[in-house]
Image (cartoon, grey):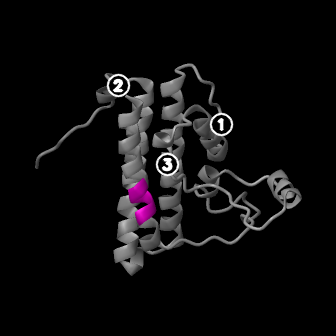
């Protein structure tokens, strides 16, 4: 049997932003592989697998955005996991259209007034990286809401993210 040992030292030659980009792409590749498995094997189409695909995907986006922010400011202070806030910061930094990408984990409020939106924003929702990581909120309570996932519909989303990551990395150099 042939073994191929991989070691973390391969990252040492990369700067911090590029390490984030590499991890972002790897998490997205993992999400894509499991989503493909779910799409083509009905026995794999389970909520736990869906939650893992979503967790890997959302974490991928978080890491990519953090890498881009670090590319702009190597000493940026990013001590949270709120990808909507991170994406907002990304958009403030990278205003040119060539830096745009469709960030799939955004809350939308179609047809709602500003007052209704503010009320909803005040309700503390778990970050997606927490929501999809754990099967229940606590040992005694379920997550609020109803959640669903369709793998074949999500494959173009994750494939698009991977294409955007590669395109944007070229823009950052």
Say left or right for 148 vs 118: left
Q: Residues within 10 Å of mark 2 (few under 14, many from 20)?
A: few
Residue visible at 62% across and 39% down in the picture:
86
Q: Quadrant of residue 37?
A: bottom left
Q: SS class of the residue under badge 3?
A: loop
Residue position for label 3: 101
Q: Please give the range of residues in magenta.
A: 156-160
Q: How crowded is mark 3: few (under 14 residues within 10 Å), some or many (20 or more)?
A: some
Which of marks 2 and 3 precedes in the sequence?
Answer: 2
Q: SS class of the residue under badge 2?
A: loop
Would you place residue 103 above or below residue 168 in this image? below
Which of marks 1 and 2 precedes in the sequence?
Answer: 2
Would you place residue 93 above or below residue 102 in this image? above
Give percent across and percent down for residue 152: 42, 73
Residue position for label 2: 14
Residue visible at 65% across and 43% down in the picture:
82
**What is the magenta segment's predominant secondary structure?**
helix
Residue visible at 37% across and 43% down in the picture:
167
The C terminus sits in image quarter: top left
Residue position for label 1: 80
């Amino acid at each position: 049997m042939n073994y191929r040992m991989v070691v973390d030292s391969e990252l040492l030659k990369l700067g911090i932003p590029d390490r984030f980009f590499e991890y972002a792409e790897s998490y997205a590749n993992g999400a894509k592989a499991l989503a493909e498995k779910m799409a083509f094997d009905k026995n794999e189409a389970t909520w736990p697998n869906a939650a893992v695909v979503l967790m890997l995907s959302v974490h991928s986006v978080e890491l990519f955005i953090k890498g881009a922010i670090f590319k702009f400011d190597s000493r940026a202070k990013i001590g949270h996991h709120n990808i909507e806030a991170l994406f907002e910061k990304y958009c403030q930094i990278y205003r040119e259209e060539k830096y745009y990408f469709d960030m799939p984990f955004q809350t939308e409020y179609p047809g709602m007034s500003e007052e209704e939106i503010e009320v909803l924003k005040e309700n503390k929702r778990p970050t997606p990286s927490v929501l999809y990581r754990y099967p229940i909120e606590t040992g005694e309570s379920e997550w609020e809401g109803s959640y669903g996932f369709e793998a074949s519909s999500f494959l173009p989303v994750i494939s698009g993210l991977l294409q955007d990551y590669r395109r944007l990395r070229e823009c950052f150099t």
